[in-house]
Image (cartoon, helix red, strand yellow):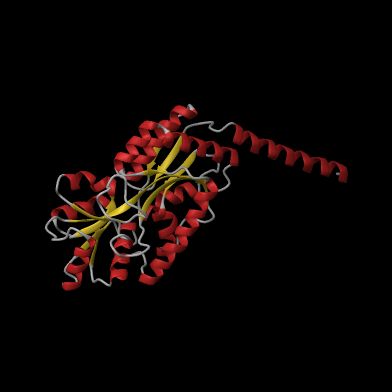
Amino acid sequence: MTLTMARRRVLLAVALGLSCACATAQTFPSRGVTIVSPFAPGGPNDLIARTLATRFTEALGVPVVVENRGGAGGTVGTGLVARAAPDGHMLLLGGPSSLAIAPHLYAKLPYDSMRDFAPISNVALTPYVLAVNPRVPAKSLADVIRIAKSRPEALSFGSSGAGSVSHLAAELLSATARLQLVHVPYKGTVPSITAMVSGDVDMMFADFSLIDSLSRAGKLRLIAVAGRKRSAALPGVATVIESGIPDFVMEGRFGLLAPAGTPRDTVARLHALVVSTIRSGDVRARFSQLGYEPLGDTPDEFAALIRTDHERFGRLIRSLGLKAD
């Protein structure tokens, strides 16, 4: 084979490769799309994923379905998306649990949260809320701290598992306020909330959407919001920061990601769909009712936030000496 002929073949192969890459981006979607929710059905992650799926189905003209792949703090479903083809047809609705917390808890994961994903957009956030069983004689965070200091290890807190956001929030409170609280982990958020309602545990940090109806029914009492500011859904409940603990922020965030290598045009189209979805009046009203703040930040902003969360939770987990069981 002559050198000229070899060069022609190389150039042809490159041209064909570029043509295929462009076709992939231009023809998205070429089939149905799956949004993986790495937690059990019925929770906030599942609810937001299904809200996106309904709107995406209308906009893309193909079926968009939600697949719940729970397990190991969200790492099972997250790993599934990390290994998927980078063409936009399998997406992840993820958050701090699997992207920023799990990498510091597990010795080995089936993905690298800093390398294996193409962030699309944060969809929504909600601050965690400290709630107590009504038999606990506390109406403010100051009351909780007073009780805990007067009776070390008398107060217990539930969590959705070791290393979960609910666990880390309570551990951070315990460390900063110098309390001795008893941790009782459960296999999921719903069992831990059920335990708080029954009085098996005294308190818990939880997503507001999951405890709103229980607080209105008098089965739980809301103590403090772990957000940067008061929640629009709970204007009468002070933040932990207002209650005397500086820089105390624990939020649940829900963001859409694709596998790394997904074409930029596809990422941009999906980002536009997220933004149009959360700007629609009925979705905003529904989010507000649940205590969610719609976000819609850019892929670069979302990527920067993942890095910040990764560093922040890493410092906290190392300071507490936590490891997954």
Tell me if residue 188 can be seen: no
In the displayed structure, 318 sits above or below 304; it is below
In front here: 89 or 286? 286
Q: Position of residue 140 (x, y in %)?
A: 21, 59
Q: Residue at x 37, y 55 (%)?
A: 228
Answer with left or right where residue 46 lies relative to residue 8.
left
Decide if residue 261 is on the left or right side of residue 43: right
Q: Identify the residue at horizontal 19%, vertical 51% (top origin).
A: 194
Residue 106 percent across, percent down from the top left = 41, 63
In the picture, the quarter occupied by the C terminus is bottom left
Res 223 quadrant in image: bottom left
Placement of 150 over or under 23, stated as above or below: below
At x 18%, y 66%, the residue is 155
Seen from the viewer's position, the closer of residues 284 and 30 is: 284
Vertical relation: 92 (above or below) 106:
above
Please, which residue is most extreme toward the left here? Answer: 135
Task: Estimate the x, y position of residue 215 in percent, counting from the top left.
Answer: 19, 48
The N terminus, quarter of image:
top right
Q: Foreground: 268 or 2?
A: 268
Q: Position of residue 281 (x, y in %)?
A: 38, 32
- Residue 114 in view (yes/no): yes
Q: Quadrant of residue 153?
A: bottom left
